[in-house]
Image (cartoon, grey):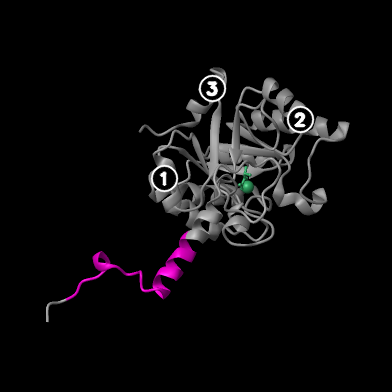
Amino acid sequence: MKKLTIRDLIKKKLAKEKITMLTAYDYPMARIISNTPLDVILVGDSLGMVVLGYTNTLNVTMRDMISHTKAVARANPPQLIVADMPFLSYEIDTKIAVRNAGLLVKAGGDAVKIEGGEEIKETIKAIVKAGIPVMGHIGLTPQRFLRLGGFRTIGKTKQEEEQLMKDAMELEDSGAFSIVIENTYADIAKKITEKINIPTICIGSGPYCDGQVLVINDLLGLSDFSPYFAKSYVNLKEIISNAINQYVNDVKNGKFPEKQHYKERES
Ligand code: KIV
Ligand code: NA
């Protein structure tokens, strides 16, 4: 299959064809995704929570992101691979941000995603100038949960709503090729989607966006906790537990290994 590009995503917006994105953090999942019509794989810093067991994303490092981006890239998927820039990899200095974005591309990312609005304009411009496509991320930005006062819906006040629209326009202006809108009201995401020319990809922000994204562990029923806006299509936790229980029982009852699982020499 032909590799999807950022230009294909913009064409999909124009054609009103929905864009689909899911997170993936490792090689086996990326291999499975490779044979599906999904458009974009996000190596999200949500890996800190759903794979590494932290309670938020602040502890995710560049090393983590590089390692997991490499694992996904080794699967050689036709999907566009977007790698999240982790907390403190882009806020300190524009030069550091460009280098870190470059490291994620060297690891196999086709683009990077950065949380924030107009305050990171110059950073986005510098990364784009280096030839690296940037996806924005506004609304609930989990790396700022301390300042936001928790993981909450953004846009309740007129001021927050206006800031969201402003952020979206500034990101487009800075050269971002797409924007994730997380956890805001559906009517706000709709207004932004109609206003800007780059695709909006939403999570917990309603159906009026150009695309949708979910954390794959939520979709597969692997998470201990899923937000209300996630939909699970299968209960893999239960399927995996059943398989482990059967294995333990089989070993204890002498039902595993069977004849085909071992070699015996003639005596
Ligand atoms: O890290 C992540 O999974 C994300 C998505 C929720 C958009 O940023
Ligand atoms: Na993220």
As shown in the figure, which amino acid type bears the numbered disc 3? Glu
Q: Is residue 107 visible?
A: no
Mark 2: C-beta under 8 Å from nearest atom of ligand 1? no
Q: Which residue sits at x=47%, y=41%?
A: 110
- Which residue was labeled with disc 1? 32
Is label 3 in a helix, a strand or a loop?
A: loop
- Whether residues under marks 1 and 2 lie with C-beta atoms below 8 angstroms apart, the answer is no
Q: Residue 8 carries which label?
A: none
Q: Which residue sits at x=73%, y=23%?
A: 191
Quadrant of residue 195 within the rendered picture? top right
- Which residue was labeled with disc 2? 166
- Which residue was labeled with disc 3? 17
Q: Which residue sits at x=50%, y=59%?
A: 242
* Vertical arrangement, residue 107 with respect to residue 212, above or below: below
Q: Is residue 173 visible?
A: yes
Q: Magenta stretch containing residue 246, yes or no?
A: yes
- Whether residues under marks 3 and 1 lie with C-beta atoms below 8 angstroms apart, the answer is no
Q: Which residue sits at x=57%, y=38%?
A: 134
As shown in the figure, which amino acid type bears the numbered disc 2? Lys
Specify the segment rendered in magenta: 243-264
How many C-alpha atoms fall within 10 Å of the one at disc 2: few (<14), some, or many (≥20)?
A: some
Quadrant of residue 233 within the rendered picture? top right
Which of 247/43 is in front? 247
Is label 2 in a helix, a strand or a loop?
A: helix
Quadrant of residue 137 within the rendered picture? top right
As shown in the figure, which amino acid type bears the numbered disc 1? Ile
> Percent from the top left, x then y, of residue 62?
56, 57
